[in-house]
C-alpha cells in the first residue's frame, strides 16, 4: 500500500526527491539552488552546494549577487511547490520587488554547502514579504528581507 503524503507537511526526504527544476521558472545555468529541504505554512529552506562553474562564483567565492538570487529562488521554489503540489497549477514567474536590510558577513567558497531559509512575513495580492537567512553550518552569512511579486497567468 502506497503511503499518502501530506503536501502541507512533507518529509525532508520527499522534498529532497523533487527535481528542483520542476518548481522554478529559471533553468540552467541560472539555477542557484540545489534541493528543497523544508516546507511548512510559513518557512521554506533549500540547500545548495556552490559549484565552481556557477555564474556568480568569482575568485572561488559565491558573490553577493548570487546569494541574493539564491534567496529569490528559494522563494520561487516555495511558490512552485505550493502551485504544483497544493494548488495543482503551473510554475509562475516572479520578480524581485525589493531587497532590504541586506547584511553580508561572509561569502561561501566553491564546494561549500549553504542552507537558505525564507520565512514569510506577509502574503497579499500576489506579493510576498519574507525574511531570509543563508547559513554555512552554524555560521550566518547573509540576512535580508525580500519582497517578491508573482505574475498572474
Image (cartoon, rainbow, N blue to C red):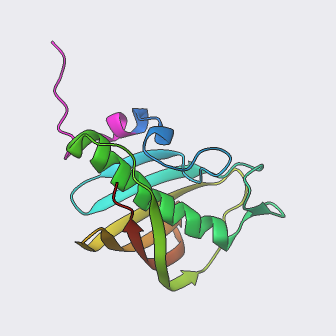
Residue 126 visible in the picture? yes
Is residue 14 in the magenta section? yes
Q: Residue furthest top?
A: 1
Horizontally, is 108 left or right of 15 in the view?
A: right
> Could you tell me residue 36's position as x and y percent?
42, 46
Q: Quick check: 48 above or below 62?
A: above
Residue 10 visible in the picture? no
> Could you tell me residue 83's position as x and y percent?
29, 47
Q: Quick check: 62 above or below 5?
A: below
**Residue 74, image quadrant:** bottom left
Number of on-image labels: 0
Q: Residue at x 35, y 73 (%)?
A: 130
Predominant SS of the magenta segment: loop
Q: Of 58 and 127, which appears nearest the observer? A: 127
Q: Of 109 and 87, which appears nearest the observer? A: 87
Q: Quadrant of the C terminus?
A: bottom left
Q: Residue at x 65, y 54 (%)?
A: 112
> Could you tell me residue 68's position as x and y percent?
57, 70
- The magenta span reads 1-15
Q: Quick check: 136 above or below 2?
A: below
Q: Residue at x 72, y 60 (%)?
A: 109
Q: Residue furthest right?
A: 59
Horizontally, is 138 left or right of 31 in the view?
A: left
> Could you tell me residue 7's position as x and y percent?
21, 41
Is residue 97 in the magenta section? no
Q: Residue furthest bottom?
A: 101
Q: Quadrant of the N terminus?
A: top left
Q: Of 53 and 94, which appears nearest the observer? A: 94
Amino acid at each position: 500500500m502506497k503511503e499518502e503524503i501530506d503536501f502541507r507537511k512533507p518529509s525532508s526526504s520527499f522534498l529532497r526527491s523533487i527535481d528542483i527544476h520542476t518548481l522554478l521558472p529559471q533553468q540552467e545555468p541560472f539555477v542557484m539552488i540545489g534541493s528543497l529541504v523544508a516546507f511548512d505554512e510559513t518557512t521554506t529552506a533549500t540547500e545548495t552546494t556552490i559549484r565552481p562553474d556557477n555564474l556568480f562564483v568569482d575568485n572561488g567565492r559565491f558573490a553577493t549577487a548570487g546569494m541574493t538570487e539564491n534567496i529569490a529562488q528559494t522563494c520561487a521554489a516555495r511558490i512552485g511547490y505550493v502551485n504544483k503540489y497544493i494548488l495543482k497549477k503551473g510554475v509562475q514567474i516572479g520578480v524581485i520587488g525589493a531587497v532590504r536590510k541586506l547584511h553580508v558577513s561572509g561569502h561561501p567558497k566553491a564546494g561549500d554547502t549553504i542552507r537558505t531559509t525564507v520565512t514569510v512575513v506577509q502574503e497579499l495580492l500576489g506579493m510576498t514579504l519574507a525574511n531570509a537567512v543563508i547559513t554555512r553550518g552554524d555560521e550566518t552569512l547573509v540576512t535580508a528581507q525580500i519582497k517578491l511579486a508573482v505574475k498572474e497567468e
